[in-house]
Image (cartoon, helix red, strand yellow):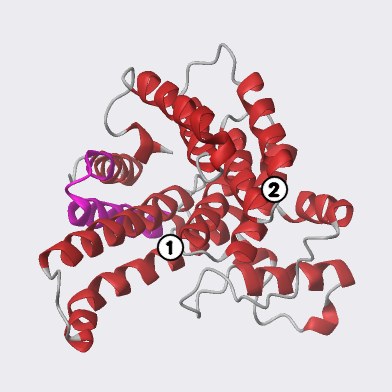
Amino acid sequence: MDEISNQEKYDIFHTQGTAYALEGTSHEKSFKNYDESLRVADIVNEDPEQQMKIPKGYSLNNMGIGKFWYFLEMTKELGKAHEGEQDKAKMEKVIQPYVDIFEQGIKDLKNSVIEFEDFHTRFPKDKPDGDMSQLDLKMKLFIDEFCDTNIKETLSKDFKTYDLRDNQMNVKFIEDLFTKAECTLPMANLGEVSLIFNKMKEAMAFFDVALKVSSSKDPSNLITNKIVSDLSGLVDVMGQTDMMIKMNNNLIKNLKGIDDYVKVFVLRNYGHILCRHKEHLQDGKARIHEADELDKNYPYWAERKL
């Protein structure tokens, strides 16, 4: 690889990392390639003569969510392999290496947001709070909380810098803070991780931020529909089933005539949410069947691409 540029090396390592991640059984090779892509990116970005910098956020996001998939797959396999094991300490020791990988994945997702937005430069740690405007200080506190890589969780359950009830203020705040549409994906991924671990309030916050970033910076991006679909599940958990149905019917209407795997996700998710309710069980099964039929048009790795 000595005869090719560092930009080309980055592209090769990043592409190989993504290919292994989508293939689904070579996660460790994927992580190795993403690590190499980040190493090359650092060489380029630290070179003062290089005018074109390499954005590290893409590799960090993909690697972060890949570590989450790997954790889910391995803990499921280990659960089956050790079925009936009564020694809790033994099981914790077996699973711990994959927990460590998962926790590093959370940090990767947060670092993806930090890199995309260049938060280290925009809000340096050594700048005294007294030298900041009230808005900049509020932004810095939000970043310190939502992108905190010193905690193992996606977000502290008693987070204080983002009031979900103040939608109007949040719209303007997120529009001012986030400058890159690319941040939508790692924020939504952090929401999905939170949701799977039943951290409902934290999931709602990440999805809300992701939706506002997407709406202000890239409103035509189909990933917005996936975020709304995830949010509808939270709305249903909160007891607002009619609102959930309205949200999903609007999504399906918006996706009419659009050939994208997001539609499969929306239909399937809607179906599973409906199946929670006895009176909507048949409609839920119909939606899942519709998703399964549409799914036949896509490669096996399409869901991981989301």
Question: What residue appears at the point 69 percent right and 26 percent down from the top-left corner?
Answer: 250
Q: As shown in the figure, which amino acid type bears the numbered disc 1?
A: Asp
Q: Residue at x 20, y 83 (%)?
A: 93
Q: Which residue is mark 2?
A: 179
Q: How many marks?
A: 2
Q: Residue furthest front?
A: 279
Magenta span: 20-44
Q: Amino acid at mark 2?
A: Thr
For residue 119, above or below residue 9: below
Q: Which residue bears the numbered disc 1?
A: 108
Classify the position of the N terminus by image quarter.
top left
**Helix or strand or loop: what does disc 1 sit on?**
helix
- Toward the left, the furthest residue is 81
Where is 69 relative to 200, above or below? Answer: above
Q: Is residue 296 left or right of residue 166?
A: left
Can residue 250 be seen in this snapshot? yes
Q: Which residue corresponds to the image point at 49% horizontal and 29% vertical from the top-left?
A: 282
Q: Residue at x 39, y 60 (%)?
A: 42
Neighbor class of circle 1 (other Cα within 10 Å; few <14, some 14-19, many 20+) is many
Q: Position of residue 259 (x, y in %)?
A: 48, 16
Give the image location of residue 163, x and y in percent. 79, 65
The answer to which image quadrant residue 113 occupies is: bottom right
Percent across and percent down for residue 122 are: 69, 64
Q: Position of residue 175 (x, y in %)?
A: 78, 49
Query: Main SS type for the magenta part?
Result: helix
Camera-side residue: 114 or 252? Answer: 252
Q: What is the spatial separation of the Cα atoms under label 1 and label 2, in whole angstroms?
A: 20 Å
Q: Secondary structure at mark 2?
A: loop
